[in-house]
Amino acid sequence: MKTLATLPVIIPIAAAALALVSIRRPLVRRIVGLASSVAYLAIAVWLVIAVDGSGTIVAAQGDWPAPLGIPLVADRLAVLLLATSAAALLAVLVYAVAKPDTDTDFPGFHAVYQMLAAGVALSLLTGDLFTLFVAFEIMLTASYVLITYRAGGSETRSTITYVVIGLVASALLLTAIAFTYAVTGTVNIADLTDKLDNVSPGYRAGLGWLLFMVFGIKAAIFPLFFWLPDSYPVAPAPVTALFAGLLTKIGVYAIVRTQTLLFPSDGPATFMLVVAGFTMVVGVLGAIAQKDMKRILSFHIVSQIGYMIMGLGFFTVAGVAAAIVFIVHQIIVKAALFLVGGLVEHTEGTGAIDAVDGVARRSPLIAVLFLPAAFSLAGFPPFSGFVGKLALIESGFDAGRWVVVGVSLFASVLTLFSMTKIWSGVFWGRPGTGPKTAIPSGMAAATAGLVVVSLAVALGAEPLLQYAERAAGDLLADGAYRDVVFGGRG
Amino acid sequence: MSWVIALAAGALFATGTYLLLSKLLSRIIVGLGLIAHGANLLLLGSGGEPGAPPILDGAASGPISDPLEQALVLTAIVITFGVTAFLLTLAYRSWTETGLDEVEDDVEDRRIASRRQR
């Protein structure tokens, strides 16, 4: 059982090594990559079932007992997001393999992709603050390579912004870890939950804010989001889809993890709600002003991050649970929407709203895939976004935070507006007569797969929400995390 | 933590931030390196009072110096080294492609600037 929890980290690293060795054999490295991602998904789903049934799995590396060793802690939140990420990783990989130019452009794609998967797994599973830093570095360094490999000319500048911002955030995270270690003498999260209580409230609040800001840069919350809409659209479609679905959400996950476990009493809750409100509104206003599908969707990433921070800011079990459901919904839907954007670019040659018309007539399949994902993003019933937003709004009413709930509803309306802008600009209108590239069936199948998963999230909303409430309960219950990690070992 | 280390880390952060705000990519990279050094130095200083002996043969009498933060710093240094090398390659590519070391304004900045000119 304990080995099982380490496999999502080990398998992709082994696969990356194999993919590098077989760098001259395109077929082998594709099979290695796909097999690794399938195994990753299978293990993640198995972990969800196992952890929900019999409780958190703690795998202490080298069998050193806590707090000495580095534990991997597979609790309900971590494995749920691992399974969701695995689904997105597999779908995007299938799409990338089917896309004709991925492999010819960059033979190392599969190796780097698997390292990114390993970084994601390690970020989610680790129970150690410094390992979290290392995991972020693995994930981000892989993402630097993926975002830069095709950039040319002026695009290089956008990718440099991305890399530089990432490095600044990493240095600040290291600073926060140094400050934490200086006062507590430990970087084990379970140990910290206890030892931070003895730290003076001012210092502790400072640490909490610093960590919030560091992960806020990665998660692209207001006002630290400027790098995102600038750099994401530059990358090839599958890479953008993966980044949009996963990377910012891992930042949100780190915020949820650290704020709930380490700073439960002095979480800057009202401040968080203000930040959340601004993130939602500024993000969606930015989206409305754009004229390119990928750029509109990139601003939406920012806007939707606000909803997750809002759920966390309520600091109730219902609020955090709603935020968790929303993260799951976003990982799937955001990736699906960017894959659809990639399909439009693939057939029409561009995703600019002014240049493309009548895709609904020319390629009805793309329109069929776009609609459920767009409705879901806007929060229309019965799609998955509705489930997440309803849960968020209900928990907001219970917490008595009327203002931010009103702001979130306002942002939802604007989201719908910008989706209709894409719909009327790209899908409606007189079909163009320009050349049209056929869509490889693998790309369409991968996108359809993600759309189906998002519909499944909507159908399974009730069990998912109950699961998320158990996960949030684990996080907010005082000392529960510590007891599990230290459990049985005294 | 010793005052010297604290002051040195502060100076590294300050100069690093100043260089980071420059428009020249080569300066930005040097600035990032300095900030990373500042963070590493802080991490090294976070292990308590200096001057204690290291652990030898597992038998310690009296205070020993904390080995953990040295291990953390080594990891962080290696990561910084790798990423800086990557960034330098990127800067070289940017230079070969555009012939400039300068980081241009982003898309929105340019759009606003062109609107003002009209």
Image (cartoon, grey):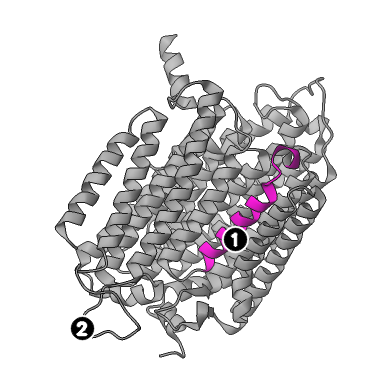
Front-most of A479 and A34?
A34
Q: Chain of mark 2?
A: B
Q: Residues within 10 Å of mark 2 (few under 14, many from 20)?
A: few
- Where is residue A3? Give x, y as percent: 62, 78
**Figure quadrant of residue A347:** top right
| Same chain assignment for discs 2 and 1 | no
Is residue A54 depicted above or below A433 in this figure?
below
The subunit letter for the residue under badge 1 reads: A
Report whether residue A458 is seen: no
Q: Quadrant of residue B6?
A: bottom left
Type of amino acid at the residue the image marks with label 1? Ala
Answer yes or no: do the residues labelled 2 and 1 have beta carbons within 8 Å?
Answer: no
Q: Let me know if residue A362 appears in the view.
A: yes
The number of discs equals: 2
Query: Could you tell me which secondary element the residue under label 2 belongs to?
Result: loop
Q: Residue furthest front?
A: B57
How far apart are labels 2 and 1 at the CA level?
42 Å
Q: Which residue is under mark 1?
A: A118
Q: Which residue is nearer to you in this view: A212 or A272? A: A212
The residue tagged 2 is B62
Q: Nearer the viewer, residue A15 or A275?
A: A15
Q: What's the magenta region?
A: A103-125
> Does residue A342 belong to the magenta stretch?
no
